[in-house]
Image (tube, rainbow, N blue to C red):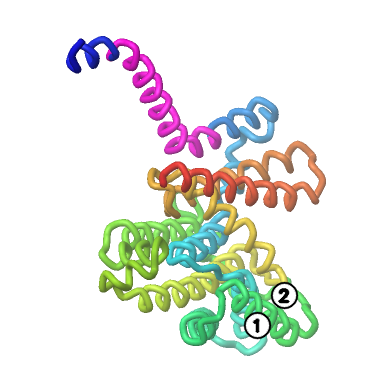
Amino acid sequence: MNSLDTATSSEPATTPVAHARASHLHYAEFLHRWGLLLVLILAIVFFSIRLPDTFLQWSTFHDLIAGQAPSLVLALAAVLVLVVGEFDLSLGATFGITQYIALQMMIDHGVSVVAAMLLSLVLGALVGLINVALIVGAKVNSFIATIGVQTALIGLATLVSNGNQPIFAGAPESFTSIGNNQILTIPLSVWVALVVAALLWVVLDYTSFGRTMRATGANRVAARLSGLRTTRALVVALLVASVLAAFAGLLDAARTGTSDSTSGPMYLLPAYAAAFLGATGSKSSTYSVPGTILAILLVAVGVTGLQLMGAASWVTNFFNGVVLLAAVLLSQLARKRSG
């Protein structure tokens, strides 16, 4: 039998196997790309059936969405740093201390809202410069460097807040209106957060600088040898992330009119959980803005549903921790698969 006859006779045996394998890969690709959205839909359906009198109310969805603007902006800050292959654990502390100082300036020192907000963003940029000096300049591991910066910021927050005394009232109405005024029944802060998300999405996915940032995170040595300006990508990512963390703190303070200098670190784990979970929903298993938005909504729906079901207060932290672990595992599996 010649080679042509052999190939012809073996084709029927291998075609079903190849077809089954192709179908399996197609199914896996579908779940990989749309799984996060499907889980979000299933969570909404589950809580809607389980809690039809409370979860299905517009007020519940309004409150759920209204509270996510600070979390989304902080998660986007985490995404920006993760894209270039680094970590910034000081984002939460930056979130807390900058919002407290801004409110303190407005209430205790009569500083205008605009000036206080600008001061907060400048402080965020200063934290970013410190991170740049440590990570890019001194070549300190980003995990270790930002833990040190976070610890120092927590100490400074205790100093400026006179022993962690929260601010409960006195925020100017012109400031709180940013968090409470509505456009089409949606709080202004949410629209602002979505604008930030849209800008970051365009930069990361549709500009040459965004491609440089992704190349820096994927393989820094290869990117540098290719002539890409990896150092600039690192500097910009660390600086902008710290400014976004400060901006997220301002959005949170504007929504509540209060500030607790120690509350920032509590936002850190959910932010990274959303960033990692959002990566599992992107086609190329990379950190993405649309995936992060879906992840933020999924975490918010889960926490809100559990609270409406009467879950104890510890369940929120437990849920966030489980989501973070699941997100990291799924992200690793997705990256191995794409590799």
Q: Position of residue 266 (x, y in %)?
A: 69, 63
Residue count near mark 1 (Cα–Cα under 10 Å), binned few <14, some 14–19, many ≥20: many
Label tally = 2
* Residue drawn at (58%, 33%) of the image: 44
Crowding at mark 2 (Cα within 10 Å: few <14, some 14-19, many 20+): some
**Is residue 173 visible from the viewing direction of this image?**
no
For the point 51% across and 55% down, which residue is it? 187
Q: Picture coordinates of residue 314 (x, y %)?
A: 80, 51
For the point 69% across and 27% down, the residue is 50
> Relative to residue 45, is residue 79 drawn left or right?
left
Residue 211 drawn above or below residue 94: above
**On screen, residue 169 above or below 45:** below
Residue 254 visible in the picture: yes
Q: CA distance from mark 1 to mark 2?
A: 8 Å
Residue 34 counted in the magenta span: yes
Report the front residue among 151 and 311: 151
Instruction: Name the mark on residue 167.
Output: 2
Please identify the quarter of the rendering in which residue 226 is found.
bottom left
Q: Tell me, yes or no, whether the highlighted magenta stretch contains residue 276.
A: no
Q: Position of residue 215 (x, y in %)?
A: 35, 63
Q: Amino acid at mark 2?
A: Ile
Q: Which residues are magenta?
A: 11-40
Residue indicated by mark 1: 104
Q: Position of residue 257 (x, y in %)?
A: 64, 68
Q: Mark 1: which amino acid?
A: Gln
Place residue 84 in its image quadrant: bottom left
- Relative placement, left or right, of 96 versus 334 is right
Query: Looking at the picture, does residue 304 appear above or below residue 22?
Result: below
